[in-house]
Image (tube, rainbow, N blue to C red):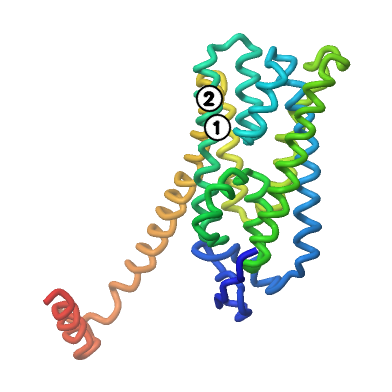
Amino acid sequence: MAEQTALTGRTGTAGALPAGPSGGPGPAAEARPDKPDAAVVRDALGVGVAVGLSGFAFGVTSAGSGMSLLQTCALSLFVFTGASQFALVGALAAGGNPYTAAAGAFFLGIRNAFYGLRLSQLLALPRAVRPFAAHWVTDETTAVTLPQPTRRAARVGFTVTGLALYGLWNLTTLVGALGAGALGDTDAWGLDAASPAVFLALLAPMLGSTVERVTAALAVLLALTLLPVLPAGVPVLLSALAAPAVLFLMGRTKRGTADEAGGSEDHRGYDAEGHSGCGDHGDVAERTEGERWT
């Protein structure tokens, strides 16, 4: 584990990540200025083990769709994006074109690149380690890493979650693929819903504000609306448009409120000829503005 970088956030604790969008998780970090490694490891193992065991569902589903044992295990070893893997084998099982199925899985996996942009700032790992760490960037490692109050805790959470998840996911994939024949009709078990259910359980507690809940609801609505008309994976990718849409609407609302407040103030402090009643302040402001551009 690399040496912890000392940063100063709102908490004033050495090694604490700055609160807010650019450095740390924000309010959660302020409420918990420090967190023991044992607590981080416990949380990380809980997520890693719970989700890692659902690799069994992928192994069973993949074998049931006609994939060989080698192909199934290779997907978990080298792709390691659960939702994309399920999308790929699901499309193949439905008789879809392999290239179309691969494209859908690719689009669904693009979200990990955006996770990586955020995690790279929090973890600040050495360059030699980053390519290996990138393989462990998933929904679950991101969900565990982001709420951590310090860089050290973020690194511990990411490493433990990634190690537990990768190891168990691949082991249970092998077990599921080998035991698929004993389960009979795999569709009747509904095992493909295990991984999304776990992720939703991780996501729900993070939706603390009204803006976050509205964004999540709009994203779900977009995905469900586009699901019948677009290839697998594309609706999930396009549902990310919910975030800029909500931010745009919030910005317009705030600007409208500010304009209304400014309009009421424009009628104060002027004489009959329209001059400001603030003495020389207007002239000073004009001179300052002129000097800024010279």
Report the disc number at residue 131: none
On screen, residue 268 versus residue 31, left or right, reads left
Q: Residue 255, image x and y in percent?
A: 38, 59
Residue 271 appears anywhere in the view? no
* Residue 54: % across, % down: 77, 34
In this view, the residue farthest toward the top is 95
Image x and y of residue 34, in percent: 71, 73
Residue type of the residue flagged with mark 1: Leu
Residue 33 visible in image: yes
Tell me whether the residue at label 2 lies in contact with that at label 1, contact meaning CB atoms closer than 8 angstroms.
yes
The amino acid type, in three-letter code, at marker 2 is: Gly
Label 1 crowding class (10 Å Cα cut-off): few <14, some 14-19, many 20+?
A: many
Instruction: Tell me what residue is drawn at x 60 percent, y 62 percent.
Output: 25
Identify the residue position indicated by label 1 in the image.
108
Q: Secondary structure at mark 1?
A: helix
Which residue appears farthest toward the bottom when viewing the image?
Answer: 279
Q: Quadrant of the N terminus?
A: bottom right
178 or 247: which is nearer to us? 178
Q: Which residue is mark 2?
A: 104
Hey, which residue is sitting farthest front in the picture? 128
Estimate the x, y position of residue 285 in percent, counting from the top left. Answer: 21, 82
Q: Nearer the viewer, residue 161 or 289?
A: 161
- Residue 254: name its quadrant: bottom left
In the image, residue 154 sits, relative to residue 292, either above or below, namely: above
Q: Please report the residue visible at 55 percent of the width from the left and 35 percent of the height from the top.
A: 109
Image-quadrant location for residue 279: bottom left
Q: Nearer the viewer, residue 252 or 153?
A: 153
> Does residue 138 sit above or below 62 in this rendering?
below
